[in-house]
Image: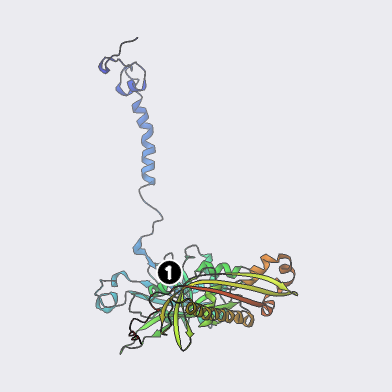
Amino acid sequence: MWPILPDWAKKPRAGTEINRRRGIGMKPGNNTSKPRRSMMLPAVLVAAVLVTGCWDRTEVNDIAIVLASGIDKEKDGYRVSILVPLPGNMGGATGGGGGSGGNRPYTIDSETGRTVREAYTKLQSRLSRRLFSGHRKVLLIGEEAAKDGLTEIMDIAGRVAENRLTSYIAVSKGKAYELLNAAPKLERFSTEALRELLKSDAAISIQVKDVALELSGEGQDTLLPYVEAVKTEGNNKPNEELQISGYVYTSGGKMAGIAKGDAANGIRWLKKSFKPYLETVSVGDSFASVTIRRGKSSIKPYLVDGSIHYKIKAQGEGTIIEASDSREYEERQNVELLERQLEKKITNDISAVGDIIRKKRSDIPGLGALLGRTYPSRWREEWGPDWPDAIGRIQLRVQVDVNVNRTGMFSKNVGAKEQPDE
């Protein structure tokens, strides 16, 4: 066995890499470190030049962030409006209207053009900062522009890479630029108030990408929330708040009408994503308000003697929010009475949407796409080319099943006095 030597007794061999670094065993004039350094120096200098800066940089002070855009129809083309925040007027929470001296923390500007892009370019030509739409939250379309057609508007929204396809989209009552000028009190920007409404349970959330896909698809029409500015009541100085009052349905890419009330509730059951909402029904001589917490539906096409039929099956769960009658909802027969009233009401809501589909030729739930997947050959040869007319002859069979499984403490009126025993 070889003895184990301490580290200080180990003699490094000449010619190894470690010896070269230490200079051991190297002949004078044979040091290769200097030539290696001389070869690396130009590469280091070139790399330093390349990474010293960004030739295509964009400074924050050079851009104007567009939070919302509005598109209106004019006689000679389109009007494009933008809402841009003013950082200098933001101020603190105590500054009037969000800025010092009560100045608005944003500015709104607009311009007209023969096309949407031409109007946008003319607007850019008089601004000192480059408009940046990468953070746009809402795209608002005026009512007249929606009636004229959504195809050109959605073309520019999807063609320019900077535009966000996840921005919320809606149709305004009247002009879009007028709605952008609304001044809700709870938010600094009308855009922020509108975005919160569009993503809440108050409406079915519709984004730019959803509208683009539905317009380019076959056998379906798109749907958009309908927004208006309303004056608040109960105040000497009424505020102007934004409100979602229904849905704009289209036919052939153009606005065909507005669904409100019962029809707007029925649309919730026919879209893919269900949003909770409140249903109020009459029970005897009084009313009960129930929140439909969960809901789902299925739509299946079938043929009867060659005519097109659809079976719509809806299922939901509800919670009693308010019951002004004296019924004991702990008793099953009273709950079943309420469930029957809810099922009748929801059936009427969905039937109201069916009337719109047939009369306005608006395929809101995409019935044509479902029919094409079920009967592809007949769709291509018979129904597809003439779908706007064929949809007017369809029949709907609606079946609703609602389960009220949370009655809470409303089964007993806590304010009512107990009746004395006889």
Residue found farthest to the top: 1
> Whole-percent x and y of residue 373?
67, 65
The quadrant in which residue 393 appears is: bottom right
Relative height, residue 230 to residue 3 (above, below): below
- Label 1 neighbour load within 10 Å: few <14, some 14-19, many 20+: many
Helix, strand or loop at label 1? It is loop
25 or 417: nearer the viewer? 417
Left-right relation of 351 to 121: right
**Can residue 115 be seen by looking at this rendering?**
no
217 or 313: nearer the viewer? 313
Which residue does the image show at 67% across and 77% down from the upper left?
A: 394
Which residue does the image show at 71% across and 65% down from the upper left?
A: 376
> Whole-percent x and y of residue 262?
52, 82
Amino acid type, mark 1? Lys
Which quarter of the image is occupied by the C terminus? Answer: bottom left
> Whole-percent x and y of residue 159?
53, 65
The quadrant in which residue 368 appears is: bottom right
> Whole-percent x and y of residue 255?
56, 79
**Can residue 322 be seen by looking at this rendering?**
yes
Residue bearing the label numbered 1: 137
Which quarter of the image is occupied by the N terminus? Answer: top left
The colour scheme used here is rainbow
